[in-house]
Amino acid sequence: MGIEEVIIAARSPWQNPCVERLFGGLRRECLDHVIVVNERHLRRGLARYSHYYHRWRTHQALAMDSPRGREAHPVVRGRVVEVSDVVGLHHRL
């Protein structure tokens, strides 16, 4: 496959852009907007964000679709309803 392991320097997170993108997005989209009360609260928020990220959040690399894909519903199926997600931080239609 031609995949090679690349070892990065210790304490050099800028050398791993995939991890930086994940943690940066997590911080900006979730943790910067929540006051964490305890470990259970943090774990629940992270689990909800993970579900939102993989099920509903759009990704540019996927042509603005989510990793699991979403079905486009025609207008005749009914009215559009907004649903609160990730403790009210994000909304989906």
Image (cartoon, rainbow, N blue to C red):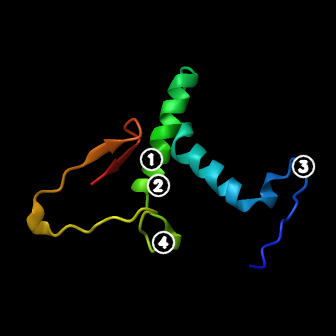
Q: Which mark is residue 10?
A: 3
Q: Is residue 11 left or right of residue 25?
A: right
Mark 4 vs mark 1, CA separation in Å: 17 Å
Q: Among all residues in the image, which is located at the extreme bottom? A: 2
- Eye-nearest disc, 1 or 3: 1
Q: Which residue matches tag 1?
A: 51
Mark 1 vs mark 3, CA separation in Å: 31 Å
Q: Secondary structure at mark 2?
A: helix
Q: Which mark is residue 76?
A: none
Q: Are marks 1 and 3 in contact (CB under 8 Å)?
A: no
Mark 1 or mark 3: whose residue is earlier in sequence = 3
Q: Among all residues in the image, which is located at the extreme front? A: 1
Rendered view: 17 above or below 27: below
Q: Are marks 3 and 2 in contact (CB under 8 Å)?
A: no
Residue drawn where x is 16% and y is 70% of the image? 74
Q: Secondary structure at mark 4?
A: helix
Mark 4 or mark 2: whose residue is earlier in sequence = 2
Residue 35: % across, % down: 53, 27
Mark 4 or mark 3: whose residue is earlier in sequence = 3
Mark 4 vs mark 2, CA separation in Å: 12 Å
Residue 69: % across, % down: 38, 65
Q: Which residue matches tag 2?
A: 54
Rendered view: 39 above or below 19: above
Q: Is residue 84 left or right of residue 25?
A: left
Q: Secondary structure at mark 1?
A: helix
Q: Are marks 1 and 2 in contact (CB under 8 Å)?
A: yes
Residue drawn where x is 90% and y is 49% of the image? 10
Q: Which residue matches tag 4?
A: 62
Residue drawn where x is 33% and y is 64% of the image? 70
Classify the position of the C terminus by image quarter: bottom left
Q: Is residue 54 left or right of residue 83?
A: right
